[in-house]
Image: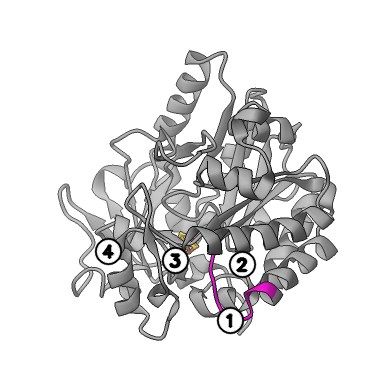
């Protein structure tokens, strides 16, 4: 089936009453053309059923509301695994696409999608954080609690973020997606400060475990268009999943990647093997009973997450890394998301500290 914009999956908007008259809310309502329910204070969208069984329905409903907490937070990393020092910009919750392994299924407890319309507060907070730490370099991403671009055809937020970051020499923005909703990025004066990123996987994993996402060829074609508009790119092999034919699968994806996208345009590529907290397995295997990968053998990691045995992780990482290095430009930073120093040394032959730390490695690759 040809891919369509994931925002088209929505059937209904819910709007918190105190946001209804905001110009940005009106803009989104107008663009969506969807029926709207206004919610009085304290009310939530009435989605039938019990979570997480009602996620199938909930993912078709979008709530426009205020973020009453902070927008910008350090990535919730753990001490035991090396982290890249990312700042998460929280633009909303949940996603209209549906990946079997998506951590949000276990992390959230509401079935609907939320998008925060008080973007005046968002930009004020960004501004404040940027000015308050004049010695810090900010790598900011919006793809932690949602997909960065899945709703962008409705919200147009990417345009505003690209514009803000454009004149901030100590910051870059990463927009991470599995969609091809990139139209709003065309023709922007981005100043090289926005990186457009796609998660990639072996083709059978993408086809079986990532519902309503764009195909490999669609993602790569979108990436090539962004490169043509002068954006730097990034790719994330995450989660790497062990499956029959994994070598051929990952090789095919890597070959197609470098056949489609100019290698000089790639700032960084990450790898991260499947990891999950035990409750996710219960939710995902109930929602997707045909999916088998949660039934493989795992160990409990130092952060309480289940992971493949170290030997298998190293074997898969080495294979993927070798294939990437055969093609990648010397300036592209290839790194792990959440792996121990021992794994870094086994696969790459060095630890991040020996290269000045992972944040510095990534910062260098941008320029
Ligand atoms: S695209 Fe990302 S946020 Fe959306 S369901 Fe998949 S893993 Fe979750």
Q: Secondary structure at mark 1?
A: loop
Figure quadrant of the N terminus: bottom right
* Residue 355 is inside the magenta segment: no
The residue range painted magenta reads 240-247
Pointer 3 or 2: first along the chain: 3
CA gap, disc 2 and disc 1: 14 Å
Q: Which mark is residue 201?
A: 2
Kindly report which numbered mark, 4 or 1, lies closer to the viewer in this rendering. Answer: 1
Name the residue rendered at 78%, 58% in the picture. 224
Name the residue rendered at 23%, 62% in the picture. 45
Q: Secondary structure at mark 4?
A: helix
User: Label 2: few (<14), some or many (≥20) within 10 Å?
Assistant: many
**Measured along the vertical axis of the image, is residue 239 above or below residue 11?**
above
What residue is shown with label 3?
96
Pointer 1 or 3: first along the chain: 3
| Callout 4–callout 1 Cβ contact below 8 Å | no
CA gap, disc 3 and disc 2: 19 Å
What residue is shown with label 4?
279
Kindly report which numbered mark, 3 or 4, lies closer to the viewer in this rendering. Answer: 4
Pointer 4 or 2: first along the chain: 2
Q: Quadrant of residue 254?
A: bottom right
Report if the beta carbon of the residue with label 3 is closer than 8 angstroms to ligand 1. yes
Pointer 3 or 4: first along the chain: 3
Residue toward you, 325 or 265: 325
User: Label 4: few (<14), some or many (≥20) within 10 Å?
Assistant: few
**Measured along the vertical axis of the image, is residue 274 above or below residue 267?**
below
CA gap, disc 4 and disc 2: 23 Å
Q: Secondary structure at mark 3?
A: loop
Q: Quadrant of residue 345?
A: top right
Q: Could one spot residue 71 in this view of the protein?
A: yes
Q: Which mark is residue 244?
A: 1
Kindly report which numbered mark, 1 or 3, lies closer to the viewer in this rendering. Answer: 1
């Amino acid at each position: 089936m040809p891919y369509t914009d994931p925002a088209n999956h929505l059937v209904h908007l819910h709007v918190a009453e105190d946001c209804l008259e905001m110009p940005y809310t009106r803009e989104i309502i107008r663009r969506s053309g969807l029926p709207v329910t206004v919610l009085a204070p304290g009310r939530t969208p009435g989605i039938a059923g019990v979570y997480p069984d009602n996620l199938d329905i909930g993912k078709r409903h979008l709530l426009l509301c205020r973020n009453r907490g902070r927008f910008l937070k350090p990535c919730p990393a753990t001490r035991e695994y090396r982290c890249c020092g990312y700042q998460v910009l929280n633009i909303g919750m949940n996603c209209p696409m549906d990946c079997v392994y998506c951590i949000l299924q276990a992390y959230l407890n509401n079935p609907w999608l939320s998008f925060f319309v008080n973007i005046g507060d968002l930009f004020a907070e960004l501004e404040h954080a940027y000015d308050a730490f004049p010695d810090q370099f900010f790598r900011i991403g919006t793809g932690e609690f949602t997909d960065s671009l899945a709703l962008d055809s409705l919200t147009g937020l990417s345009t505003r973020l690209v514009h803000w970051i454009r004149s901030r020499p100590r910051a870059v923005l990463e927009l991470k997606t599995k969609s091809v909703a990139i139209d709003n990025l065309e023709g922007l004066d981005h100043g090289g400060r926005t990186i457009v990123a796609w998660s990639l996987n072996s083709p059978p994993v993408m086809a079986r475990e990532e519902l309503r996402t764009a195909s490999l060829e669609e993602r790569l074609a979108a990436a090539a268009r962004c490169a043509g508009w002068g954006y730097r790119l990034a790719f994330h092999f995450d989660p790497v999943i062990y499956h029959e034919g994994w070598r051929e699968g990952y090789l095919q994806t890597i070959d197609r990647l470098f056949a489609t996208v100019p290698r000089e345009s790639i700032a960084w590529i990450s790898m991260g093997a499947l990891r999950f907290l035990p409750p996710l397995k219960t939710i995902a295997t109930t929602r997707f009973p045909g999916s088998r990968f949660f039934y493989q053998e795992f160990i409990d990691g130092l952060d309480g997450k289940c992971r493949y045995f170290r030997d298998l992780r190293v074997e898969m990482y080495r294979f993927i890394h070798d294939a990437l290095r055969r093609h990648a430009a010397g300036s592209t930073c290839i790194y792990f998301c959440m792996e121990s120093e021992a794994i870094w040394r086994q696969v790459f032959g060095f630890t991040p500290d020996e290269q000045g730390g992972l944040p510095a490695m990534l910062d260098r690759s941008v320029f």
